[in-house]
Amino acid sequence: MDTSALTLVPSEGPTPSDSASPSQVVPRAEEPRLVELAPETRPPRAEDLPRSMRGVIGLAESFLDVYRVIDRVADTSCTVLITGESGTGKELVARAVHSASGRSSGPFVAVNCGAIPEALLESELFGHARGAFTGAHATKTGRLSLAQGGTLFLDEIGELPLSLQVKLLRVLQSHEYSPVGDTRTLRADVRIVAATNIDLDKAVASGTFREDLYYRLNVIHLHVPALRERMEDVPLLVQHFLGKARQKTGRPVAGVTRAAAELLSLYEWPGNVRELENTIERALLLCATDRIEPSDLPARVRGLGPERRASARLPDIGIDLRAAVEGFENDLIRQALERTNWNKNRAANLLGLNRTTLVEMLKRKRLARASTAA
């Protein structure tokens, strides 16, 4: 991600308030310290975004495309399957589908199919009659009934047991179901939205997920991109989560230093948006000044994870130390250049070098991009 999209606020002088107008541009200083979003990366006007995207942070095209599809299908009754890695915000997308639909005045009921024990999941979903099984001392209303007139969100649908997949298929086909231990057939007036972070095609091939149910769910497929696939949204999200954490904790942290912003922009975020939010809140709580420094960030974000601290092992037959050191140095230089898209200023910062030193090393080592190498 290009951090030239970040405006650097001088370390001295008043700190802009959270309520400052987007049109107020803070001038650059010779020794910048705090980081804010440049005007071109600020959220656009609400009327320029997809209708379903109210309150959602993101400007990457792959992310906007998800909400453009929602705008087109929200008012229909079709089922929606949301896929994406853990922490990408699949429930947020499901809520957007509900809010933009004609069922928005009805309930939104969420069920995590992977968090409820299999023995209890059928009762949770469909309800049960009194005396249906040992311990059923009273009639229980299921989530399906609670979602009448609204949307039932089935998170982690890939964890649904095969025995319950049959019952869910019946709901999708005939809009009918029966509570456990009840002879009545009830009408299901709900829209089903499901989500998963597993590959359902592979689950179907392995026999752990019914093919007919998969096709019933996968009428409209929305794939939420991982954060590393929309890194241009990181500055927006950092600003949003910083404001949210300030409000939650009451800590008067004004911003993020340039060095910390660079690390946040280069880390690949395997835990996605959820990891970024937790990282910002943690950094704010640990911050001893009015700005988040690199030392406030977790070791993994600073590139100091255990895998980087592991000591080298000397082979039994010995080693050419100079060649090993040269190779190690070359590898780190190339990693820094590739992580920064061969931006020598940013790569030099990552390596703790002056730009001129890095340029001289590249000439001496004859390191160049593969596409430009002679």
Image: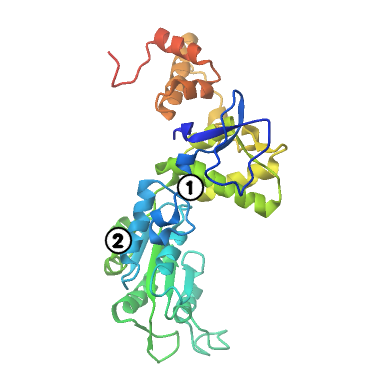
Report which residue position mark 1 lands on. 272
Q: Is residue 290 above or below residue 198?
A: above
Mark 1 closeness class: few <14, some 14–19, many ≥20 residues within 10 Å: some
- Apparent side of residue 170 relative to residue 259 in the rendered image (left or right): left
Task: Assign the N terminus to one quadrant of the image.
Answer: top left
Whether residue 332 is visible, yes or no, is yes
The x and y percentages for residue 338 are 40, 27
Q: Are marks 1 and 2 in contact (CB under 8 Å)?
A: no
Q: Amino acid at mark 2?
A: Val
Color theme of the render: rainbow
Mark 2 closeness class: few <14, some 14–19, many ≥20 residues within 10 Å: some
**Label 1 to label 2: alpha-carbon separation:** 26 Å
Q: Is residue 231 above or below residue 57?
A: above
**x 29%, y 57%: residue:** 201
Element marked by disc 1: helix
The x and y percentages for residue 246 are 66, 49
- Apparent side of residue 33 relative to residue 182 in the rendered image (left or right): right
Q: Residue furthest right?
A: 288
- Apparent side of residue 6 relative to residue 294 in the rendered image (left or right): left
**Quadrant in the rendering for residue 337:** top left
Foreground of the two, 265 or 132: 265
Foreground of the two, 140 or 366: 366
Foreground of the two, 97 or 123: 97
Report which residue position mark 2 lands on. 204
Q: Is residue 280 above or below residue 330?
A: below
- Apparent side of residue 235 relative to residue 63 in the rendered image (left or right): right
Q: Amino acid at mark 1?
A: Asn
Task: Assign the C terminus to one quadrant of the image.
Answer: top left
